[in-house]
Amino acid sequence: MRKKFYDTAVKQEKAVLVGVITPNETEEQEKEYLEELQFLVETAGGATVKWFTQKMQRPDRATFVGTGKLEEIKEYVVAEEIDIVVFDDELSPSQLRNIENELGVKILDRSNLILDIFAGRAQTAQAKTQVELAQLQYLLPRLTRLWTHLERQKGGIGMRGPGESQIETDRRLILNKISLLKERLKSIDRQNETQRKNRHQLIRVALVGYTNVGKSTIMNMISKSEVFAENKLFATLDTTVRKVVIENLPFLLSDTVGFIRKLPHHLVECFKSTLDEVREADILIHVVDVSHPNFEDQINTVNETLKDLGAIDKEIITVFNKIDAYQPVQTHPDDPAHQLTLEDFKHSWMAHHNSPAIFISALKKENVDEFRKLLYDHVLALHTARYPYDHLLY
């Protein structure tokens, strides 16, 4: 009998991106936000085919972009058989319901998309618990849209009652689940705190930075380990700690989840325990992708997050990574000859403002020895201050 073979490959979903340009944002900024959103969609396994933007004083309370723009999006979605529409900001439950009813396809906002990526990347019990907690907190105010099928049943006495009671039942179940997950996280945090106390005698260094700037590649380079590194957002979700030795001087190096703009608040709250490595580190290595056209904004985002974590006053070494991919920046719009080269940037206020700083390419192994020496000097200085009788060993 002849065997039948079926194509089991998952169809790549076609996505449309939607953003609103408010008076305090420029078109260039919104373009950058949507480029990042497109990267998020690609990381989740989708393919972006078109962007839609709308200039407004503020997002429309009912449809986010207004009825006219929503009708334009609907025409394109139907004509091109789009699978998913992704909005660059978090949608309210009523906006989500109205947009779904109008477009008739799957609707995601930025928060939901990030949660989906996090769910696929979580490996440890702690990360999985944190993601599940954040998903339930996101879902809770949006429960009613899951029961809209009851609205289509007309004429039945009492049809509304079971729907309402089911929503209340689900809400109670979710609240109970949230309570259990919070207790589980507290237990995991206590275990992690015990592990950290056992490591207190070593200087602790943490890699921080915007997502996809090369932290995991640097981690592998310095620690000679095999931490997962990929050219996708949030490739690293679980905090990894390795013992590193440079010239007989041991210290602990940790790789943490990358930061990003508009990170959902409930996700930040859930992952604060993961970022304890940042709060308790002695030295922070702030990794910057110097080849990114808007790396200055990324630096500001990371600094704001560090401020929220209470870690901005720690000793920070700035590592400008990916110098192999740096492209000279045109500094005068009418004169292509006016360009900011990498050498110019090294002597600019930005480099001096983020001092101590070093320029490397972790991928091409450029200036790696200088980076190791800089890191060694800073770890040794702290170690000598903390353990003055050990300084003769190094």
Image (cartoon, grey):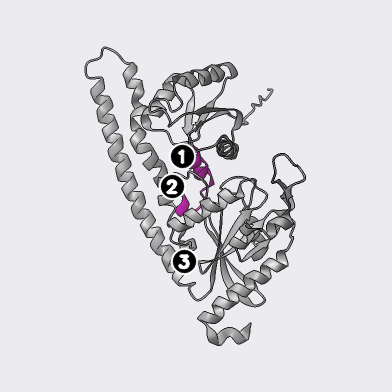
Residue 346: % across, % down = 69, 59
Do the residues under discs 1 and 2 have CB atoms within 8 angstroms?
A: yes
- In the rendered image, residue 120 lying in the magenta stretch gets the answer yes
Q: Mark 1 falls on what kind of element?
A: helix
Q: Residues within 10 Å of mark 1 (few under 14, many from 20)?
A: many
Q: Secondary structure at mark 3?
A: loop
Sequence order check: which comes first, mark 2 or mark 3? Answer: 2
Q: Quadrant of the N terminus?
A: top right
- In the rendered view, tell whether residue 385 sits above or below residue 272: below
Indicate which disc, 1 or 2, sits on the residue closer to the N terminus: 1
Residue at the far top in the pictured view? 155
Say which residue label 1 marks. Answer: 111
Residue 354 visible in the shown view: no
Range covered by the magenta-colored residues:
111-131
Q: Is residue 386 positioned above or below 242 on the image?
A: below
Q: Residue at x 48, y 27 (%)?
A: 106
Q: Position of residue 289 (x, y in %)?
A: 64, 52
Question: Is residue 205 depicted above or below 95 in this figure?
Answer: below
What residue is at 73 percent from the left and 63 percent from the top? 367
Judging depth in this view, the residue of 279 and 106 nearest the camera is 279
Residue 324 painted magenta: no
Residue type (three-letter) at the residue carrying disc 3: Glu
Specify the label residue 88 is tagged with: none
Q: Main secondary structure of the magenta part?
A: helix
Question: What count of labels does the image hold?
Answer: 3
Spatial separation of the CA atoms under disc 2 and disc 3: 20 Å
**Image side of residue 340 versus residue 22, left or right:** right
Q: Mark 2: which amino acid?
A: Leu
Seen from the viewer's position, the closer of residues 335 and 311 is: 335
Query: The disc labelled 1 sits on which kind of residue?
Result: Ser
Read off the residue under disc 2.
267
Residue occupied by mark 3: 280
